[in-house]
Amino acid sequence: MTTSPTSPTAASASSRTTMDARHSLVISLLLVSAFVVILNETLFGVAIPELIDDLGVTAAMAQWLTTAFMLTLAVIIPITGFLLQRFQTRPMFIVAMSLFSLGTLLGALSPGFEMLLVARIVQASGTAIMMPLLFTTVFALVPPRIRGRIVGRISIVIAVAPALGPSISGLILDTLGWRWLFIVMLPIALGALTLGALRVVNVGEPQPGRLDLLSVPLSAIGFGGFVYGLSLLGEAGQSGGEGGEATTVAVSAIGIGLLGLALFVWRQLVLQRRGERALLDLRTFQARQFTLSILAVSIASMALFGAIILIPLYVQQVLGQSPLVSGLLILPGALLQGLIAPLIGRRYDAVGPRGLALSGAILLSVAMWGMTFLSTTTPLWLITAAHIGLSMGLALLFTPLLTNGLSAIRPELNSYGSAIVGTVQQVSGAAGIALFISVAAAAGGAGSVASEVSAPGIQLAFTVGAIIATLAIPIVLLVRRVPQEEPPATTGQIAAQTPLHTEAEPTS
């Protein structure tokens, strides 16, 4: 007697471990697009000195090209949770990549600083939408049992793209010029926009809801003010004689931002108690594993962005190497992280998060402590080796924690969880940059505008960073695997609103 090739039971089992080709293509397009927009985020750090000379602006003005980008992300990302609930996937993708492409075109054509600043803000507006869109789509389409390998690919975007930015930027600046930072990106962005407009599918049904007009300015003041204050604090550390006044402004901005955040949280809780749709649904934090993952990812993001900004400064200002050399030194670690992240994702699917995340936290801490010994005579290969250790630690942390944490929340809260992940990474990155640079510059005892860091300053900055990185170890010890239950629908239909409950903790 013959049997049918595929029984309903077999088909169901297959759906838990595979994706259809269409969904796989959609996620691949989103991954490529996200990689491009995140890579762009760190391109301009190395270009600041050339922009000062070419555009005839001050160092403080040129720094606004980075500060304005970070501020735009901090303001828009928290709102994306609501936007992804209210609008469908394909239109949101088209808006995101259209904004990024428009900003890139404006940058390539910029005749002066003002238009260049507008270009960076428009670019950042598209970038802010892309990462939450990617996470929301992945957790709607990908079966739980294979999410680790897909999030492993997302980890390439999160960690490798920012690390590649200085290397690519240094190469372009040494051979072409700052305008080519936009020209090279433009055809890639337009190609991603065209393919995505044709191929990206809509995930779920839009949920009707009213935008709370009070939450939007509170979010902008809270997140924007806090990130702005942190960025000013980093600049104040290098501003010598003007540092006292700049520090006062920075502390004031941070204080206003914290007050805005407190009012924003209060407003979201009030809306949730009334049964109204919050701008950023904070019920995600009722899931214990999501909260633990966010805490550990915050620490890892501080280490990542702090090291990315401080290692090139150290190599250029202490060791006297070129921007290209400083970028190439962190390239091996970034490439290795990209290679192993999907493998770590597969391992997570098999064994869960705790062993991987604990190994990553320990390796991250060891690498950071190792960097406290950097001096004026440290060989370049040793810097690369330390950064490789840092990159491997981050790879072991990001993939398991993000997969496990976002799997812990209810499907109808996916977009809010994705927005929180993006917001936390952005704020933590700004905090890491401000902390590392401020400590390094202050310890160097410099006394002029745009002063250079010193070896003792580098050592102290990495000591502070190592202490913070060590705090991730006890946090990941509390991480437990979230039960791998199938979502209510895996073919694109997001479940309707249901009462939230926290995930059950397995005994093993």
Image (cartoon, rainbow, N blue to C red):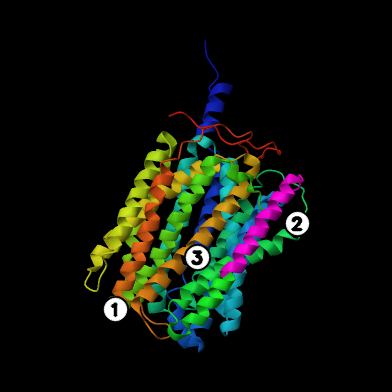
Q: Amino acid at mark 1?
A: Gly
Which residue is labeled 2 in the image?
Answer: 212
Sequence-wise, the earlier of marks 2 and 1 is: 2
Circle 1/circle 3 CB separation < 8 Å: no
Residue 128: image quadrant is bottom right
What residue range appears in magenta? 254-278
* Residue drawn at 76 percent across, 60 percent down: 213
**Which of the two marks, 1 or 3, is nearer to us in this view?**
3
* Residue drawn at 50 percent across, 66 percent down: 41
Circle 2/circle 3 CB separation < 8 Å: no
Which residue is labeled 1 in the image?
Answer: 320
Q: CA distance from mark 1 to mark 3?
A: 26 Å
Q: Is residue 167 magenta?
A: no
Q: Is residue 423 above or below residue 244?
A: above
Q: Toward the viewer: 60 or 327?
A: 60
Q: Toward the viewer: 175 or 136?
A: 136
Q: CA distance from mark 2 to mark 3?
A: 27 Å
* Residue drawn at 33 percent across, 72 percent down: 457
Label 1 element class: loop
